[in-house]
Amino acid sequence: MLDVFLMFAALALILAGAELFTNGVEWMGHKLDLAEGAVGSVLAAVGTAMPETMIPFVAILIGAHGGIGAHGGRATEDGVAVGAILGAPFMLATLAMLITGIAVLVRARRPGRDDRLLVDTWVIGRDVRHFAIAYALAIGAAFLPAPLAAGKLAVAAVLLVLYALYVRAHFSAERTETPAGDLRPLRFGRLDPLRHQRQPRLRLVSLQVIAALAAIIGGAVVFVDAVSQLAGTLGVDPTLMTLVIAPIATELPEKMNSVIWISQGKDTLSIGNITGAMVFQSCIPTVLALVLAADAWTVTPDSALGFASAAIAFASTAAIFLPMLRRQRLTGRGLLAGGGFYAVYLGLVAASLVGVI
């Protein structure tokens, strides 16, 4: 019971830190006059991706150093890391799309509205293409035979370059100022005695971002240890446990932000927050695995079900966004397809747990 309590307490701390981080980077984007794509697909996406990114990072460090109470050993901690890395793109491409689609359909019930999203299809299409290329490279590296394992380092280098080019493309886009009235108040704004007379200063925004990162990292340390112990107690594969359980909670920032932005009519920010996080997750966390846990980032009979989530993520992304690229429009009903793919994978996991497959 203690492990369960610690796991949920850690998730609460991670989510609180993520909310602080997202709020802070939104204000940072405003202060720096960044384009909408840069704010949604880069700043907000990276901020809300921090929880699921820190979990594999901390897990790999714990396993490598014998850990902060690491009871499962290096293999268990690497299994937690791989599960978290695979689970993030899967949840974003399936469950996050489903929830956002439902929010769009609810909005469509308002007079004069339909389920069409007013998104910049060029910006979203660029995100999807970057995700498809980067994640295909990362998953392909998991099939490399042992004699070619050094090739994983080359793939990691390519992924870093791809993400750098992606970020540069967004930051070089035409800059548009976001009205301060469209932003939620800075959470640390109350620390400024003159808050009613001016916008929050950049130093206060930076302080909130740093404090949020500290909360996320601390929560990730506790979460990794709790999941490792619980998996050992229940005899459950830690890779599957982290792939299914952790991302449901750690992807909440993307889901919550997207729903809020849909309700405010900021459709490009809403979808860009998800697709930008997909690009980030396909590049940066996978680099951690390729460099620091290369042995675990391998398709084997034991890890095949975990890596099958990548195939589901690709299929869901194609089903949702290929029609958008052809028709130059995206609808709430189209986003609901993610729910079907999510259900398919849950069925595979359930079949595995009962021994059917």
Image: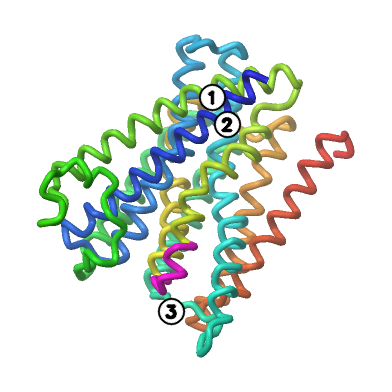
Indicate whether residue 72 is drawn in magenta: no
Main SS, magenta residues: helix
Q: Earlier in the sequence, mark 2 or mark 1?
A: 2
Number of dots carrying numbers: 3
Q: Which mark is residue 224?
A: 1
Q: Between label 2 and label 1, give the one nearer the viewer.
A: 2
State the extent of the magenta-drawn residues as a range. 259-267
Q: Give x and y (percent) for residue 122.
A: 39, 74
Q: Which of marks 3 and 1 is nearer the N terminus?
A: 3
Q: In this view, does 319 lie above or below 203?
A: below
Indicate whether residue 263 is drawn in magenta: yes
* Residue type for callout 2: Phe
At 70% from the left and 17% from the top, the residue drawn is 232
**351 and 156: which one is in front?**
351
In the rendered image, which residue does mark 3 sit on?
118
At 28% from the left and 50% from the top, the residue drawn is 25
Residue 88 placement, left or right of 287: right
Q: Mark 2 and mark 1 in contact? Answer it, CB < 8 Å.
A: no
Q: Which mark is residue 8?
A: 2
Q: Is residue 285 something that shows in the picture?
A: no
Q: Give x and y (percent) for residue 21.
A: 33, 44
* Residue type for callout 1: Val
Quadrant of the frame with the C terminus = top right
Quadrant of the frame with the N terminus = top right
> Can you name the residue that lies furthest to the bottom here?
112
